Image (tube, helix red, strand yellow):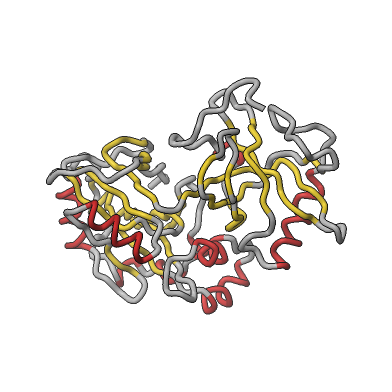
């Protein structure tokens, strides 16, 4: 089976009401689809990049799924010291690049696979079936284990949204009960409502600190015309000192005299510009009137294409001459 691009939710300001919707906790993890057929087991992320050897605890599909062939959709989640999903922690697993390190990182960072949908089962695609039918099928063929869980469904999205706020979770996803699974599409049949905002951005430059090391990275996202807009800067955030130094080493050979941003950022006369090839995840509080991020905090370096770092649909649209 060739990997597919999963369905994505659209952003919404509040949970929809009505019996035609269910709500699920939005887990702050890494989207992973599990594929099993006669040729074996493969794992892929939302960008169809293989993750099979990153998560060995998920490879014995027969221990948690009764289907002889299947495609499962869910999120791989790691917990922080406070017991809440921690994106930085799960990226310690997802960011491993050498197989010989997997066993050590696996011991240090346990993960859970939170399954919320099924696309294929026992030789047949089930994406055209309503969500309610797919969830019923999912419960029949998937057995919860120490590392695999179903994502629970809730009838009251507003109540679940409030509960996730109190617990300090990321938010919820609301889904229409009668909706099919639309491979590769972002549709209003799924709506994400978040307490915490996050963004995938690409690094277009960096500044130097007082010690001569990297002080901050300059972030950008692409508009529909393919232009890279500067949206703010951030320091090391959740990265350790070693991770921050490693990021600086990755950026150094990408140096370029050309400013990659459509509009040159102000106040950065001494910035080192780099070719926009390294993507990161940041969290932020809101957007400023000048269309930049307020209080961005670096969470992790991502293994995604730079061109995937685009303006989110709920953000102010950049305009020519805005900077």
Residue closest to the eye, 59 or 180: 180
Asked if residue 134 lies left or right of residue 201, the reply is left
Q: Nearer the viewer, residue 103 or 311?
A: 311
Residue 40 appearing in the image:
no
Residue appearing at x 51%, y 64% in the figure: 90
Considering only vertical position in the picture, is 57 above or below 162?
below
Dividing the image into 4 quarters, which one contains the C terminus? top right
Residue 5 quadrant? top left
Q: Is residue 147 above or below residue 114?
A: below
Question: Where is residue 305 drawn, in percent x and y?
Answer: 59, 42
Residue 48 coordinates in the image, percent (x, y): 47, 46
Height in image: 108 above or below 24? below
x and y, in percent, of residue 64 in the image: 29, 69
Front residue of this view, candidates 126 and 174: 174
Question: Is residue 152 in sight in this rendering?
Answer: yes
Residue lying at 23% horizontally and 46% vertically, measured from the top left: 124
Residue 289 versus residue 233 in the image, above or below: above
- Looking at the image, the residue that sits furthest to the front is 289
């Amino acid at each position: 089976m060739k990997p597919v691009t999963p369905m994505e939710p659209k952003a919404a300001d509040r949970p929809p009401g009505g019996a035609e919707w269910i709500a699920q906790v939005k887990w702050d993890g890494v989207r992973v689809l599990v594929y099993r057929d006669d040729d074996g087991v493969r794992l892929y992320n939302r960008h169809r990049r293989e993750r099979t050897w990153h998560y060995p605890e998920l490879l014995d599909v027969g221990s948690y799924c009764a289907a002889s062939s299947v495609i499962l959709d869910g999120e791989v989640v790691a917990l922080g010291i406070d017991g809440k999903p921690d994106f930085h922690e799960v990226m310690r697993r997802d960011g491993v690049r050498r197989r010989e390190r997997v066993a050590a990182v696996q011991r240090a960072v346990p993960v859970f696979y939170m399954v919320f949908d099924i696309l294929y089962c026992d030789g047949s695609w089930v994406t055209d079936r309503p969500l309610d039918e797919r969830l019923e099928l999912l419960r029949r063929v998937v057995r919860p284990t120490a590392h695999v869980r179903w994502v629970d469904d809730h009838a009251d999205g507003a109540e679940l949204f409030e509960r996730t706020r109190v617990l300090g979770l990321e938010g919820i996803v609301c889904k229409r009960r009668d909706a099919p699974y639309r491979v590769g599409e972002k549709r209003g049949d799924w709506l994400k409502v978040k307490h915490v905002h996050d963004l995938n951005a690409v690094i277009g430059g960096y500044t130097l600190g007082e010690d001569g090391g990297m002080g901050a990275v300059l972030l950008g996202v692409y508009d529909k015309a393919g232009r890279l807009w500067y949206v703010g800067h951030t320091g090391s955030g959740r990265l350790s000192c070693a991770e921050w130094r490693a990021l600086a080493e990755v950026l150094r050979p990408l140096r370029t005299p050309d400013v990659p941003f459509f509009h040159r950022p102000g106040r950065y006369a001494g910035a080192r510009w780099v070719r926009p090839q390294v993507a990161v995840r940041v969290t932020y509080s809101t957007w400023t009137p000048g269309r930049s991020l307020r209080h961005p905090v670096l969470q992790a370096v991502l293994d995604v294409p730079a061109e995937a770092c685009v303006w989110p649909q709920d953000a102010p649209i950049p305009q020519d001459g805005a900077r």
